[in-house]
Amino acid sequence: MISYNKSQEGRNIKFMRKMQRNMAVFALILLMWSGSAGCTQADVQEYLQQSRQPEQAEEHQNQKQAEDVIQQNESQDVMRQDQTEDIMPQSKAVVPPERISLEKYAYRQLNGTEQTVYDEMLSAILSQEERVQLSTTDTEVMQRAYKAVCSDYGGLFWVEGYVFTSYTKGEELVSLEFSPKYTMTKRERRQLQRQIDGIVDAWLAGISISDTDYDKAKYVYELLALNTEYVENARDSQNIVSVFLGQQTVCQGYACAVQYLLEQLGIQSVIVSGTARGEPHAWNLICLDGEYYYMDATWGNNGYRNKEGQETSFIDYNYMAMTTLEMQVGHQPDLEIDLPECTAVLNNYYIKEGNYIEEWDADVIGAKLSQAWESQRVITLRFSDDTLKDQTFQYFIKEGRIMDYCSNITQINYIEDSVWKEISFCFNQE
């Protein structure tokens, strides 16, 4: 006789508790902005406090005003700065750099002015400049450009945000100075980069740049699911250091790592921020064979509890290559960057692996179950409609006909998912 155990369907998705907000008033207009959009973050709120000093002599007309601080990560202390000079300092202006981001997704969503500011910011960050005078005086342009930089580049682990200084002459805003907030020295950054490069080379040893886009995406998705643990208080959780050196991270770390790894394999990817089930979250938009899909590596690791109460994990492929409609089942983008309507399905895991069932054939389904049983692994079948799913459930589970295909089977652990129209047969209980 076969015993059956229906595992709990709930996915233990943990989210970082919402950040604390701090506000401080200074003698300058300064704004600190954190570009990461991880599970520890809440919506950005602006707190603007302005104070004006009396006009000085003509040579001191460049006045600075009060400061505005945005704090997004509760695990990072606000670095407060207080400057009292009356004359605008001579900041180092960055010569417009080579446009290295032409193929980057978020970059291409910006207008010409925003792209120029993006280039200036990226150049300053890559060369680790202390400050740079931007070619705009529009703070919204600055914020949109910085958000795009962080969306396109998941590997900027040495910077966690920026401070800007706004200079006025009388009532006129005449200059914006951008100062990245670095978390380490150039030497420390180089040392960490060498360590990361070593880990990445080892992780990507099993895949080639010449492999198909699907194989690359699946490889990275599985790589992160098998090698990285979701830990709320993980160190450096908002960047790739937590993934490659700590193997513990949150959603922002996963999203940054996906972008970074896929880039090494020639796959375009961008970090998407928003909410998932009402909580702040980050995931990715990826391009496979010229078509866009959404990937959420954070949710790639699933698990179930067998009859003896033992917890066993397995890779959940529902979130590997999603359409817009599938993504919207649990995700809501913040729309800070324009996103495409994703309708392609050719690189969907279930279709690609032949586990999408569109018609009833007991022997075809049985053969798939037999192969999974022999290799002691989880197999998830997705059905085109509820009728097919119910028919499969009735035949193989309720009637026990799975014994015709899986020799010596005595127990079935399964997960039935009505949202995705799926049944997962968990044969990896040993």
Image (cartoon, rainbow, N blue to C red):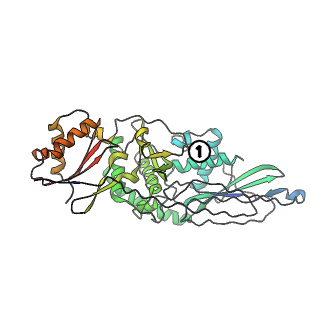
Residue hosting label 1: 98
Residue 354 is at least partly visible in this image: no
The residue lying toward the viewer, choosing from 236 and 21, is 21
- Residue at the right extreme, as displayed: 57
The residue lying toward the viewer, choosing from 168 and 417, is 417
- Image check: 80 left or right of 322? right
Kindly identify the residue that appears in the image at 70 percent across and 46 percent down: 138
Position in image of residue 87 (x %, y %): 81, 60
Kindly identify the residue that appears in the image at 61 percent across and 46 percent down: 144
- Say how many tags the image has: 1
- Image check: 94 left or right of 18? right
Kindly identify the residue that appears in the image at 41 percent across and 65 percent down: 246
The residue lying toward the viewer, choosing from 119 and 334, is 334
Q: Quadrant of residue 23?
A: bottom right
The residue lying toward the viewer, choosing from 286 and 197, is 286
- Image check: 254 left or right of 394? right
Tell me the kind of residue under disc 1. Answer: Glu
Q: Quadrant of the C terminus?
A: bottom left
Are there few (<14), some (14-19), or many (20+) residues within 10 Å of tag 1?
few
Position in image of residue 62 (x %, y %): 82, 56
Position in image of residue 125 (x %, y %): 59, 55
- Residue at the top extreme, as displayed: 359
Position in image of residue 395 (x %, y %): 16, 41
Residue 174 is at least partly visible in this image: yes
Question: SS at mark 1?
Answer: loop
